[in-house]
Amino acid sequence: MNYFKKMKGDAKSPLQVNVKDLFTAFVGSFLTIILLLELTEMTDTPWFMASFGSSCILVFASWNAPLAQPRNIVGGHVISGFVGWAVAELVGTTPMTLALAVAVAVVFTMALRVTHPPAIANALIVMIGGYHFEYLFTPILLGSSLVVVMGLLINNMRRTRRYPVFW
């Protein structure tokens, strides 16, 4: 019975939102994704992947959270992508290995202190897409680095924000 009582959730949500935060999140997310897509168009190199969209909410809406810091963004994206690539290369892509890659990516990013939830999707993206090792550099490394650069530029325009909290 105590097990199910824990699921009740007695606390109120601590999340607070103001108009300036909404505006910053909108502008930062919009400009970051547009830039990634434009770079893809201009260079014929993939700069964009769906998981970067999810990274934007952490970078621009929860900029001071540990999971939104630069080392977590870049490290989380690269490690998760590498795990997906390695699992696909070593044992192939099946429902079981997709689940294995996600679980291994979760453990590795936690152990290396670079947890970034949106990045875990990279293990699946790399495996399902059948991407080669080069994909770890572009779009994963370069794209996630660009997300960080945009976070630095946009967040620090606000006097009340200081991004990053740590490297």
Image (tube, rainbow, N blue to C red):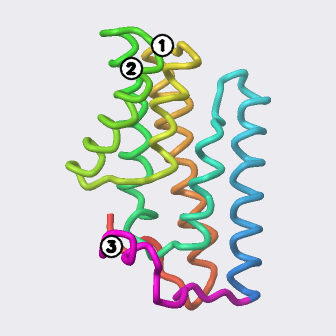
Looking at the image, residue 90 sits to the left or right of residue 143; the answer is left
**Residue 147 against residue 6 in the figure, above or below:** above
**Residue 16 colored magenta?**
yes
Distance, label 3 to label 1, CA atoms, is 49 Å
Give me the residue at 34% from left, 37% from top.
Answer: 103
Residue 38 position within the rendered picture, expressed as x and y whole percent measured from the top left:
78, 39
Do the numbered discs 3 and 1 sit on residues whose CB atoms are within 8 Å?
Answer: no
The earlier-in-sequence mark between 3 and 1 is 3
Q: Which mark is residue 132?
A: 1
The three-letter amino acid code for the residue at tag 3 is Met
Residue 34 position within the rendered picture, expressed as x and y whole percent measured from the top left:
78, 48
Q: Pick the residue in front: 80 or 28.
A: 80
Classed neighbour count for the residue bearing mark 2: other residues with Cα under 10 Å, few (<14), some (14–19), many (≥20): some
Residue wearing tag 2: 97
Residue 109 position within the rendered picture, expressed as x and y whole percent measured from the top left:
30, 46
Element class at badge 2: helix
Magenta-highlighted residues: 1-18
Q: Quadrant of the N terminus?
A: bottom left
The earlier-in-sequence mark between 1 and 2 is 2
- Camera-near label (3 vs 1) is 3
Q: Which mark is residue 1?
A: 3
